[in-house]
Image (cartoon, rainbow, N blue to C red):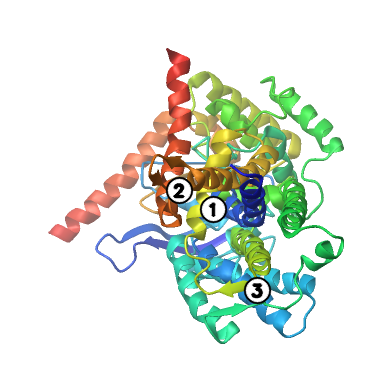
Amino acid sequence: MTWYAFFGALEQGFAYGLMVLGVYLTFRVLDFPDLTVDGSLPLGAAVSAVAITNGVPPYLSLLLALAAGFVAGMVTGILNTKFKILHLLASILTMIALYSINIRIMGRPNMTLLGKNTILDPLYNLGLSPSVAAPILFGFVSILTVIFLIWFLHTGFGLAMLATGDNKQMITSQGVNTHRVIIFGVGLSNALVALSGAMICQNQGAADVNMGVGTIVAGLASVIIGETVFSGRSVTRAVVAGLAGSIVYRLAIALALGLKLGRFSFTPSDLNLITAILVVAALTLPQVRERFRIR
Amino acid sequence: MIALERITKYFHRGSINEVLALENVSLKVRRGDFITIIGSNGAGKSTLLSCLAGSHPLDEGRITIDDKDVTSWPEYRRAGVISRVFQNPLMGTCASLTIEQNLSLAARRGQSHGLGLGVRQRDRELFREKLCQLGLELEDRLKDSVGLLSGGQRQALTMLMATMVRPKVLLLDEHTAALDPKIAHQILVLTRRVVEVQDLTTLMVTHNMKQALQMGNRLVMMHRGRIILDVDGEEKSRLKVEDLIERFYTARGEEFSQDRMLLV
């Protein structure tokens, strides 16, 4: 792999890492399979792109994306808790609704940021090249988020959230309104996903309504790979493993795409196949390890 | 102190599987009462506790605690004054959290779970002291996850959690039925001690008539969703298992004769 490809994978791993942390929050902490992310990732991109085009400072546009994602997640949470719609279905409903909403926000299916300011400009002004600036900035943001999540999951409210995903009856008996926890938790998760979308959009210079397709698959793949490679029981390790899993996933894809066996090589359209194989490998690796330990 | 007034509860109402679980049940619980509740399967004992805890909405009737109408309070809100130990020892604790994290959730029962640190250093000392009283050597395992504990240990922990913050009412739903005899006995001893030390108002459902006679100051027998016997004090202490069986068959017999009347 070339250094260029390596930094590219690192950059993607960090930028999508926020999304993976969001998926970890719903999928693992709340035990809430949430497909909203396929819609909230482009939502963050759309909100950020429209805001920047209208003269909002790029960093402020991230906050708007964060808020928009939070609201989208809350909608899913409310559909599930208050309207008693199955979590999976509730999230699919929000996801498809967001497709239309994202086009409404942008006024068209996609939008470029050519010639506009982005969050990366301050780093370029320091003389950093784009291939170095992006990994540094995204790495910084995602490590901050990891620290935030570790702190959050150790607070009283964070413990209540962990308990909600584990044993609803128990935490209800301790006086916690699980509806509120779920609505907030799914909101927080999608806020992170939307932030991820906003950063990706500014990095690639465009927002597209279809950029969210397959987000949940990449997110789950990263979470599962992270768990397999950096397995551990504590919440701290699990959160770090989420981000690390995202990087490993992007590196593995970069490796596969750079692979040449004689006349055979992978093309970007093979990405889904590679993802599926990676997840199967991550899921079966612990069993294989177990078997060798016994023998 | 707690008053259940003419409460009625159906399950699957309106379908062919309709069950009348509680029929016009009224019960006045006085402060400091320790009531044991017995009855055959499907008598409505557990439903009574669930209705009191707020897990099921009532079809009719109302519930007041200290003259406050709590009928419309959701379960989590009632948890501020009511704590509960379930028959299933896995139900009262979180397997993936550590012992100290479980205890810290219990220490905040009924309060807001804010953004302060979940487990603080001064909590740990209190937890260790409380765990010491259980005599199960859990005091040095604060950071072990609860999933590593046995069913009996988890039930003891649940008892501790239920009484960490003194509840106005403690509900015990056959809390020793799923345990082996030795640990079941330990849990009963623990129950008796906690109830006495904290002077708790308690409702305990049990299948064991001997237990029902030995524990508490008042005994309630249920059958087919109704209370068919309610004795306390002197009268209860004179009761024997045979008396209970007789009372039970009398109640059932009356029902049979009524059924026969219907048939004739």
In the rendered structure, find residue A275 and report the number of the disc placed on it.
Answer: 2
Q: Badges 3 and 1: C-beta atoms under 8 Å apart? A: no
Q: Residue at x 49, y 33 (%)?
A: B239
Front-lying residue, A49 or B78: A49
- Report the label total: 3
Q: What residue is rendered at 46% in x and 47% in y? A: B46
Quadrant location, the C terminus of chain A: top left
Residue at 74% over, 24% down:
B139
Where residue B165 sits, quadrant-wise, is top right
Q: For the residue carrying disc 3, how many other residues have a C-alpha within 10 Å: few (<14), some (14-19), or many (20+)?
A: many
Q: Which mark is residue B204?
A: none
Q: Nearer the viewer, residue B58 or A105?
A: A105
Residue lying at the far left of the rendered structure: B264
Tag nearer the camera, 3 or 1: 1
Amino acid type at circle 1 is Gly
Q: Which residue is mark 3?
A: A68
Going by the numbered disc 2, the residue's amino acid type is Thr
Distance between mark 2 and mark 1 Cα atoms:
11 Å
Describe residue A133's horizontal placement relative to residue B207 as left or right: right
Residue B172: percent from left, percent from top: 56, 41
Give the mark nearest the N terminus, 3 or 1.
3
Q: Are marks 3 and 1 on the same chain?
A: yes
Q: Return the chain for callout 1.
A: A
Q: What element does badge 1 sit on?
A: helix
Q: Residue at x 63, y 69 (%)?
A: A69
Secondary structure category for the residue under label 2: helix
